[in-house]
Image: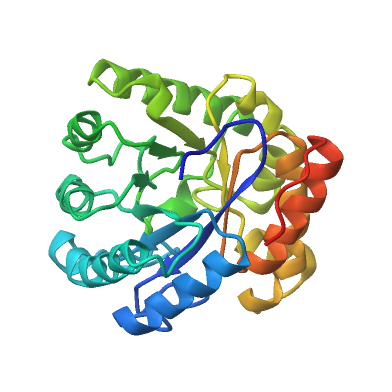
Amino acid sequence: MSLSWGERTYVMGVLNLTPDSFSDGGRFTSPELALRQARRMVAQGASILDLGGQSTRPGAAEVGPQEELRRLLPVLAAIRSAIGRGELAPAPLISVDTFHAAVAEAVLDAGADWINDVRGASSLRDPAMLQRVAQAGCPYVLMHSRGDSVAMDGLARYGDVVVDVRDALLAASEEAMASGVRREQLIWDPGLGFAKTTEQNLALLRDLAVLRAEGVPLLVGPSRKRFIGAVLEESRPTARIWGTAAVCAQAITARADVLRVHDVGPIAQTARMVDAIVRGCAQPAL
């Protein structure tokens, strides 16, 4: 599948292969369960599947590349095999959520299409990641974050959060291109919920157009996050679906290109409706 930036909104389905992710940890830890969920998300409208073997929730412990790959590779092989047999149609792109260059190299060799790097615009970046992505020529999501999962909540200090996030993403993009990554490989993610308070997340959402004006495709990942729970006074992550839909509608209005979500069906419908209003396009029926 090839994506046409600017023509429609694409939905990326979250497939966590971890025991400790904040809202769905432990649900899809076997290849059989993960493949069943992949089929469900594609049927509901996901154009991209984002596989993760390391939880990035606040306070999560890092498991290291070897454990990440133990979780990722069997599921990646099962999904790639199902695509080859025509069981997932239309065939989704496969993204892998990792900040380790060794993991990126292994999953790209095993058939992944994208790398989604939650530390792409962080000082903790694996220095070898850019070389791996440049060599592969694959799409590369640069996400804004600060610190690791343990430290990030204490690093939410900004002058102007929108300007500071934009400038960090610009600097990370320049570094990536200096390492051989082509500009057209880059996708930006403002990192909602990563080293940001509720009000800072809301400010970013109000002014997403500032980021989109730089001409880099924009991915937004608000799904079930704490700031939605804070606004709605809803402690249950799985009950934040309509708050997530509202955030996604705002993101599409600001011309975001990809929405990274757990609840693919409702958000795919939201995207179709808002695209019809904002972009004037009619997406094919699911």
Q: Total label count?
A: 0
* Residue 134 to residue 74: above or below: above
Dividing the picture into quadrants, the one containing residue 242 is: bottom right
Horizontal side of 123 relative to 264 (left or right) equals: left
Q: Picture coordinates of residue 145 (x, y %)?
A: 44, 43
Q: Quadrant of residue 67?
A: bottom left
Q: Is residue 208 left or right of residue 48?
A: right
Give above or below for 1 relative to 233.
above
Rendering coords of residue 258 (x, y %): 58, 45
Q: Residue furthest front?
A: 86
> Which residue is pictured at 43% across the width and 52% down the height?
152
Q: Hey, which residue is sitting farthest right in the picture? A: 277
Classify the position of the C terminus by image quarter. Answer: bottom right
Q: Residue at x 72, y 42 (%)?
A: 252
Q: Is residue 209 visible?
A: yes
Residue at image point 17% right, 49% down: 109
The quadrant in which residue 20 appears is: bottom left
For the rendered model, the colour scheme is rainbow
Report x, y in % for residue 270: 76, 57
Residue drawn at (52%, 75%) of the image: 23
Asked if residue 268 is positioned above or below residue 265 in the image, the reply reads above
Q: Position of residue 192 (x, y in %)?
A: 57, 49
* In the image: residue 50, left or right of residue 258: left
The answer to whether any part of residue 22 appears in the image is no
